[in-house]
Amino acid sequence: MNIGEASERSGLPSKTIRYYEDIGLLRPERGGNGYRDYAATDVHKLRFLQRSRGLGFSVEECRQLLALYEDKSRASADVKDIAQTKLTEIDRKIRELTELRRTLEHLVHACHGNDRPDCPILEELSDGG
């Protein structure tokens, strides 16, 4: 199938598919005319990559996961380690975002939001309060 059909079946834009090919995540066959010829297995890999990226895995983590997926002698512990590392990273980001939210919420509540020029939000942004 051509890249347009692979795009439609995988739900990924053609540009993303070409990028994945450029960085070696996907290697579709080439027809006699030189055009890419995507197989059902390529579409499956594209969907795998789409779901992996949707869960926040980096391109390199996706490369590792895809290699493990294709390695029938893999140890599930290797897959779990990658996922656990990502989960720890997500937890850290959640903590950081929670703290940012608390700080911003405090500033919003401290600002009267009236016609006066005094504004704790701008003071905090200007010099750290």
Image: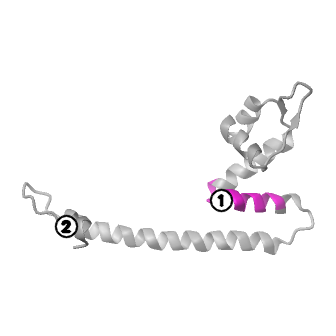
Farthest left residue? Answer: 116
**Which amino acid, by three-letter code, is at mark 2?**
Glu
The magenta segment is 54-67
Is 21 displayed left or right of 98 in the figure? Answer: right
Is 98 displayed left or right of 89 in the figure? Answer: left
Marks 2 and 1 close (CB-CB < 8 Å): no
Measuring 73% from the left and 46% from the top, which residue is drawn there?
20
Specify whether residue 62 is painted magenta.
yes
Number of the label disc, if any, that sits on residue 58: 1
Query: Magenta segment, principal secondary structure?
Result: helix
**Which amino acid, by three-letter code, is at mark 1?**
Ser
| C-alpha distance separating marks 2 and 1 | 37 Å
Is 2 displayed left or right of 117 in the figure? Answer: right
Mark 2 residue crowding within 10 angstroms, few (<14) / some (14–19) / many (20+): few
Does residue 128 lie above or below 3 as drawn? below
Q: Is residue 11 visible?
A: yes
Number of the label disc, if any, that sits on residue 123: 2
Residue 98 rendering spot, x and y as whole percentages: 41, 70
Is 24 displayed left or right of 30 in the figure? Answer: left
Measuring 33% from the left and 71% from the top, which residue is drawn there?
102
Q: Residue 1, located in which quarter of the rendered image?
A: top right
Measuring 71% from the left and 60% from the top, which residue is drawn there?
60
Name the foreground residue: 59 vs 112.
59
Lower position in the chain sequence, tag 2 or tag 1: 1
